[in-house]
Image (tube, coloured by chain):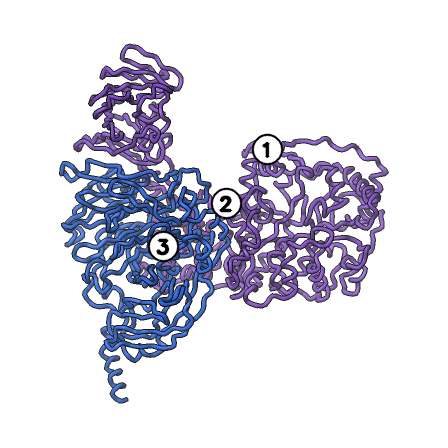
Amino acid sequence: MVKTLLSLFLVGVFSLPAFGQRRENDYYQLQTLVSAQAKTHSRDKRWRPDTNEVVLEVTGLTSLEDGRLAVAIRKGEIWILSNLEGDPKNIEYSLFADALHDPMGLVFKDGTFYTAQRAELTAIRDTDGDGYADEYENVAAGWGVTGNYHEYTYGPKLDHQGNFWVTLNMGMGDHAYNGDDLWRGWGVKIDQQGKLTPVCSGMRSPSGFGANQQGDMFFTDQQGNWIATCSLHHMREDSFFGHPWGLRSPHSDKFPTSQEVDKLSPGVPWPAAIPRVKNLKPPAVWFPYKKVGQSATDVVLDNTCGKFGPFAGQLFIGEFRLSEINRVFLEKVGGEYQGACFRFRSGFDSAVVRMDFSADGQMYVGLTNRGWSSLGSSSYGLQRLEWTGEMPFEIKEMRSKPNGFELEFTRPVDPESAADLKSYRMKNYTYLLQAKYGSPEILTERNDITDVQVSEDGLTVKLTVSDLRQGYVHELNCINLKSKQGDALLHPNGYYTLNKIPGLAE
Amino acid sequence: MKSKHWVSALSGLSIALLTLSVVKAADGTPPIIPGLTRTADGDYAGQPGNALLTELSCTACHAPVLNETLQPKKGPVLTGLFHRIQPAWATAFISDPHQVKPGTTMPDVLGKLAESQRAQVARELVAFLQSSRKPIYAPLKEDKNGDPGASNAERGYELFHTVGCVACHAPDASEKFHQLKKEDFEDNGLVGVGPVLSEWADSVPLPDLFEKYSHDSLTKFLLNPSHSRPSGRMPSLKLNVVEAADVAHYLLREKTVQTRPSGAIPAPELVEKGKSHFVQFGCVECHQHDADFSQIDRPAYERLVPERFDGGCLDVQSAHRPVEYHLTDAQRQLIKSAITAQAPETGEQFLHRKLVTGNCYACHQRIWSDQESVGGVGARRFSYFETVGHVDFGDEGKIPPPLSGVGNKLVSTALADVLAGKRDIRPHMQARMPLFGAPVTEQLPSVFSAVDDAKKNQPVLEANLPEKDLIEAGRQLVDKGCVQCHAIQGKRMTGVVGVEMANPISRLQPEWFKEFLLNPNSKRPRTRMPNFFPQGNASVPQILEGNVEHQVTAIWTYLNHSDKAELPDKLLADEQQGFELEPNESPIRLRTFMQNVGTRAFAVGFPERVHYAFDLREVRLALAWKGRFLDAHGTWFDRFIPFASPLGNEQITLTQGVALAQVDAASGRWPDSAEAAGIRYLGYRLAKPPNTVPTIRYGNQQIKVADTLTPTETGLLRRMEISQAPSDAKWAVLLASINTSVKREGTMVHVDDKLRIQIKSGHEVVVKDGHILLILNSGAQKVEVSYQW
């Protein structure tokens, strides 16, 4: 007993200075490359479209193998930035392409850039090697563009088969379908020959998407009409995600009709809605409103094999309004993806719209908040996020089990606090599928943690949880959990979307 | 209250009342009081029966024993009815109000008479009403909004379904609203969801308006309803004279009825009898009329006491009820319990009753406690509430604000202003805050204040810093965040539609302001307003050393001095912004949405001040013009991306069809779309800088065109390189479309007396289907034409 007390005392004395009040910045450092504050403001009176000022309102971002970075901006230009390693003052800018209509993504493949304009997927090439594009090729078009501002066209991104994916924002305001908004609210796939296939429907504002390690495509949607809170969905054939306006486009009978979904407009809890609507798929992850963002954007896979820290293979999710990045762990249960989200890094200068990893494992983060607003002091910019090499204390994975959850941590836990049932709290809730804007958390119930098993290496904790509910978000709060070194979790909450309980009979 | 569905078991009374809207009383439709039906499953204030006593105007005849505040609703002013209501309708209504207007709160006062007698009395009553010809409304006049005579039913339909009429009344019979069944709502497994439970509000019934009104009289009524209905229950929706005429036109089912033949002058003896009936049957107790009734004896009415239930209006056994409302059992029961209780209302009960009787709950939610919430726009009516221009503003931009804690939020003078029809601070919302009559609103500001325990003499936000420092710090803070969504001094950034922020001290309680800034969610759950002080910390630490109290005070101080202080930088810059594209050395390209070109417009401007726009969707050379090129503001900056228009002059429409197609010898028709022609836009190539002239490429598997336009002194030179035109069919390119005339003169073609096209490459030109077509030879070739205008 004396020994235990003593060791606790020692931990207290020696670890507090080192680990007390640890912040995100201790592990992931943010460097500003371009910020509206540092350079000329996009709304500065001196700014003119025909000057050489680069207004990096980033809507597309792709890092090139030679260390340069290509950036698409809202003004419709693609810039290539080089000399990024040293003082940001020395970054060199080169205009590559211009006269693009709201490019909303950027991909570089086989010497060609690809971007989705409002009405077209375009390939852009510099055929004479002078560094300025001279060929703009129409790869695919044909989706509806009525002129409504909210009909953004996002992408492209590539899946592992080499297909381009594009997501088509819904227009704002419920208007009768007249053929002009064909495939709005859909995720479409474009093969190498330019053939366009509408794949899945029910999107509202799919402003970001990307492939996971397996090459499956995931998009984020944003809270709004029919979308209860921001979400991460697996884009696959014949799946419908809940927003019915896109169903006015011609579609196969694998999808519900818009009238069928309209009937639910007063509101149905999601678990009850799933059996009532053909091929309605719940998101793999719900992002509880304002707990983990309130306007999800880009989806980027950590493909750095550890250069960016302990989260290799997981997804990072951009967040617009709160100017931050969140993190997602996914697993397959019963053949479908589901998983948990966690907060990751806040404090960006403006809305996080696009991210991409450099070859050396740093994350470039493209910012712009025009038209909406966000935290942070700038209206646009480019920042770089770098792992310091120090291991943060985080819930790395939260896996569902037949009778609870298994948590894997980035560092060993303190066995005592980890074995204490009172270190954890859990509740679960779901959302309404309804025509209204968003949904509160509904039908909330507490879960009791009835047993805790801590692995020998202290990296894994198994929680036995009573009254798990299929179809509900299970919100975990590790309030009193400490690491072996005595520091608290950097982000003590995990939010698991339990679409299926493993092993539970259908 | 709705939430009581799951909070507590329903009382038997509530269950009975729930069915009020669907179960008819034995012999007629029961009166509808929508504010009450909406909340009938709860009894927060304990005495919703009081609302029946006022809304059925029981207390117009019968004095309540205790409750002095139970002012009866009463009926419309009947002076000057001649000018307003069709006599035939009035006669029918008086004879059988529940038949003519199901759901009316007007009691049947003649029901106990024999049928023949009833018709006679009704005729005499109407004769009396027709005899008063003093108009109460001034004639309609044309004003700056236009001529009410030129009304438009479609605009009326639109207004009726957007400004707020359908918050209380049912939407048009053609609307989806009527297909949504209550069962669908109940079927959705929502037990346990509380405030989001779909409410099923009754609609305020309308009679056959065409039979009742003329276009003129309905327009006047809609302009100023409380003038003839002093109860104030029917509010003004702040329609201007043209809007009122439009809505009236729609409501009269698009039949334009300006005047009707006026009824004959009634015989004096009928008028005299009618006047007597007016008093005898109690009409005078509810309806204002300027006749002198002092010579006629008025009947005595009982006080509202339980002892008089038998034999009175509520006696179901009696065949001779003095008046007939067709009450449901539940309504009757509720009235009886209210009369039996006769307890003075608490402030909360009084406020709740006022919100019920004004049907404020139709639009506004009020959360009374953790578990009790009333009102708000229901699921069936939700789609009739929209944001102007469909801006993505969430429900906050569509749905009127909640009234929870409003006494703590607004200073009571501001609330009084809102209720008096002033201070419309949500111009982005299509629904309008109606202007109710005084009986609905006059006590509300003080009652809200009392019930919400508004802190008197709240501490002002102060910091021990020089005011000018606070103002400047506030200006910078407002610049960082607030101006992205809010207007200040009427100035707003492009596309911004949020609530005006200037001078909050005239509107908001400082404490509320502070709490809202520090945690917007605490005042408006799930608001889109971000928390600029996450976890209570300043998100801009470099201003006022990140002191949160000081920052909030600085924002408050700046906003209250914003009329004299400088605008935030972003607004200043926005004001001075210019986006005109001026090609000086090189051609400028812009892909944009463009009037008369479409959503895939490709505009090219040349330093020579000649420009063109190509429609890439329809593969069509659309427009050309001279002088100034384009303003890119709409494309690059305006969130709502308005379609661009040429800035210059001498604009001509060149073609109205696809640029390349096979000539169909049989039909002589030119395909009406690129798709029909099998032609698609392939891309464009640029010439070397600095003279980056684009070459637009289009075609299909068989034939491809590279189309280059360059400026000349008088217009544009068009060069087309054709790859391998097939020999088995005749292909042509479209040079121009004709509106009025075409004339050939050697190699020159004159179009519409404006445009000259010179064929330089010697190709054959034909006129077909309103188009000037250049016929291609087979094989590769070059086409060269010059456009001059």
SS category of the residue bearing label 1: helix
Instruction: Say which colour chain B has.
Output: purple
Quarter residue B778 falls in: top left
Category of crowding for the residue at label 2, using alpha-carbon neighbours closer than 10 angstroms: few (below 14), some (14–19), many (at least 20): many
SS category of the residue bearing label 3: loop
Q: Are marks 1 and 3 on the same chain?
A: no
| Image position of B379 (left or right of A61) | right
| Image position of A310 (left or right of B214) | left
Q: Which residue is mark 3?
A: A295
Give, as a three-letter code, the residue at label 1: Pro
Q: Are marks 2 and 3 on the same chain?
A: no
Category of crowding for the residue at label 1, using alpha-carbon neighbours closer than 10 angstroms: few (below 14), some (14–19), many (at least 20): many
Output the chain of dot 2: B
Which residue extends farthest bottom? A2
Q: Nearer the viewer, residue A24 or B179?
A: B179
Quarter residue B546 falls in: bottom left
